[in-house]
Amino acid sequence: METYLICLAAALVGGLLLTRLTKLLHLPAVTAYLVAGLLLGPFCIGRLGLPGLGFNSLEQVEALQVLTQTALGFIAFTIGNEFRLGQLKAMGKSAIIIGILQAVLTTVLVDLILIGLHLLWPDMISLPCALTLGAIASATAPAATLMVVRQYKADGPLTRLLMLVVAIDDAVGLLLFSVSFGIATALAHGQVSILAVAVEPVLEVVLSLGLGAVMGWLLHVTEQFFHSRSKRMSLSVGFVLLTVGLSTLHFEVGGIHCGFSLLLVCMMTGTVFCNICETSEELMERIEGWTMPLNILFFVLSGAELDLQILSNPVTILVGVVYIFARSLGKYCGADLSCALTRQTTPIRKNLGITLLPQAGVALGMALTAATLPDGALARNVVLFAVLVYELVGPALTKRSLLAVGEIQPEGRTSARTLNEKHRKYHQLPVHPPKAPAKLRVFHKKKHA
């Protein structure tokens, strides 16, 4: 246990210290956390084998998966806060159209390009692998996007639309992957399962939304028993932890495999809670401050679990480059077309697709499932390579796009200590209250006499 605690401390402190360097380079803090994970991972400092000094193996990183899953749950819960009725009325229809259309177009474009690669060089990539990678391409990383928005306090039409689209994108990506993976499995093994292709994906989405709605309502009912801010925040944290635990359950009913999507469950919990609780905004702000160290560890661990051995395989690099090019083109063109159909402004049309490029946890989870295919190892390695590139470059591109539309505040150099000192002096009361005028003191003496 002491080894894991020292590793976590090194990850947290190392990630924070590296942000001083990335700030000089005008890069988001997310990039620093990911690079810190790579440096502390089993292919750099961790290779030295010194206990506590970095992660010595991928198994050691995977043993801390409970932290990454928990952090992802809190991130999804916070994103659910964006689905307030006021925002949904303003741009809900547009967000749904954009979220669905750009994801589908990305999948179709990646499928076509990778199938063409299969027809030219059948030994390089199989047809099931190409179809699976096309579906994985639709997924976007909500965590990296949220961290950039938080760090720079971004706000505006593009930011609000982006948060809604990212949440919808995950639900659409889950359906696309489930259908594509079912077809890929049928092509690989010669058996078509209607349950796996049509029933189970829809059922997973419905069950996830249902469980999330129930947990959001229960959180609202329970928090009314408490009036202390700290106790209500603790209760909210406990409910998110409970929701994350329940979302990992799997069971079978009548031959149908049933499960939940952690992201969808926690997003729905946050959505229901923020729309029925009058004090949800205050609670969300307090939870965001509490979960910041957890989010840092999430990105450091994500960087540490990236397998750099894939860079030694030229086939993986070649297919990965094609995949990155096709996905980037699909996200940009898909977002541009869908924004044009919903009559968005030109700045949003030109920048939304770029902000959708980051890819991480959701795609890695899909790639882990795709690894069960006969050619699944290639799919997993390609996604790992793409995630390595997207996570290092994507947050910086997101920042640049939000900066281009004027939704990021200029970075200041004011220290938090300076701000706190000014705040203290402004609100500080004098130690000795000023004396009353002499005439008034004489009047009071005569009156009391």
Image (cartoon, rainbow, N blue to C red):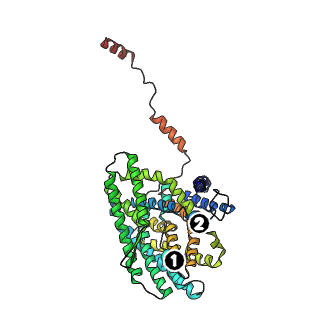
- Type of the residue with mark 2: Glu
Residue 435 in picture, x, y percent from top left = 41, 20
Locate the C terminus by quadrant.
top left
Q: Separation of disc 1 and disc 2 at Cα?
A: 20 Å
Residue 238 occupies which quadrant of the picture? bottom left
Q: Name the image quarter holding residue 377.
A: bottom right
Is 81 above or below relative to 330? above
Residue reaching furthest to the right = 48
Picture layout, residue 403 above or below residue 381: above
Residue 449 in the figure: left or right of residue 284:
left
Instruction: Name the residue rendered at 56%, 85% in the picture.
Output: 118
SS label for mark 1 = helix
Q: For this rendering, which residue is in front, 311 or 358?
A: 311
Is any atom of residue 160 visible in this view? Answer: no
Q: Position of residue 111 (x, y in %)?
A: 50, 81
Residue underneath mark 1: 370
Q: 10 Å neighbourhood of mark 1: few (<14), some, or many (≥20)? A: many
Q: Residues within 10 Å of mark 2 (few under 14, many from 20)?
A: few
Above or below, 12 against 392 in this view is above
Q: Is residue 5 above or below residue 359?
A: above
Please name the residue shown 36% across and 70% down the image: 207
Identify which residue, 320 or 396, lies in the foreground.
320
Q: Residue 164's x, y, as percent? A: 41, 64
Q: Residue at horizontal 43%, vertical 58%?
A: 241
Q: Earlier in the sequence, mark 1 or mark 2?
A: 2
Please count the marks in the image: 2
Quarter of the N terminus within the rendering: bottom right
From this viewpoint, which residue is outermost toward the front?
1
Amino acid on which disc 1 is placed? Ala
Residue designated by label 2:
59
Q: Residue 18: where, in percent of width, then height?
A: 61, 55
Q: Secondary structure at mark 2?
A: helix
